Structure formats: structure tokens, C-alpha cells
Image (tube, rainbow, N blue to C red):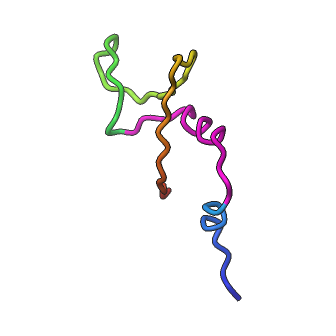
Amino acid sequence: MPSYDANAEEAKKDVSIDDCFNEFKRPEILDQDNQWYCNKCKTHVQATKKIEIYKAPPIFIVSLKRFKQEK
């Protein structure tokens, strides 16, 4: 009986442009090597980075790339 691989199933699912934008704007916790320098505390602190697009310019160029992320 073949073993079930959840990652292989997930890789086969269709991805929409909305899925890509939602992943792009998802908050990211900065790790130990990428800590943010706080001018008030004068130290590096763990922070959350979030990218948002409030208003798109008249010409909006999106570069789509294929990649696989291992967790």
C-alpha cells in the first residue's frame, strides 16, 4: 500500500493569485539573526514584519516565481 504524503498532495493543489497575495502580506516574526534595532531601547529586539499595499500605482508589476519552501 503506498504511503500518504501530505506535502505531495499540497504541492499538487492549484494556487490562485489571491493565495499568493495573502501569503505575501502574512506577518513574519523576525528570527534571532534578523532582529530589529530599537533606537529607544538601543538594543536588538524580536519584532514582527508585515508588508501591506495600501494603494497600487497606475502600473503594478508582479514577478511570479516558482519555489518550494521546506519547513
Q: Residue at x 59, y 41 (%)?
A: 20
Furthest-front residue in view? 59
40 versus 43 height, above or below: above
Residue 15, given in percent of the width and then of the height, sits at 65, 50
Pick the front one: 25 or 60: 60
Pick the front one: 10 or 29: 10
Residue 16: quadrant of the picture: top right
Q: Which residue is drawn at 68% across and 58% down?
A: 13
Furthest-bottom residue in view? 1
Furthest-top residue in view? 40
Q: Which residue is drawn at 71% across and 89% down?
A: 1
Q: What stretch is highlighted in magenta?
A: 13-31
50 versus 56 height, above or below: below
16 versus 58 height, above or below: below
Residue 17, given in percent of the width and then of the height, sits at 63, 40
Does 1 lie within the magenta span?
no
Pick the front one: 46 or 26: 26
Q: Is residue 34 left or right of residue 61?
A: left
Does 22 lie within the magenta span?
yes
Residue 55, given in percent of the width and then of the height, sits at 57, 15
Residue 59, given in percent of the width and then of the height, sits at 51, 22
Q: Residue at x 48, y 58 (%)?
A: 70
17 versus 57 height, above or below: below
Furthest-right residue in view? 1
Q: How many marks?
A: 0
Q: Is residue 58 left or right of residue 18?
A: left
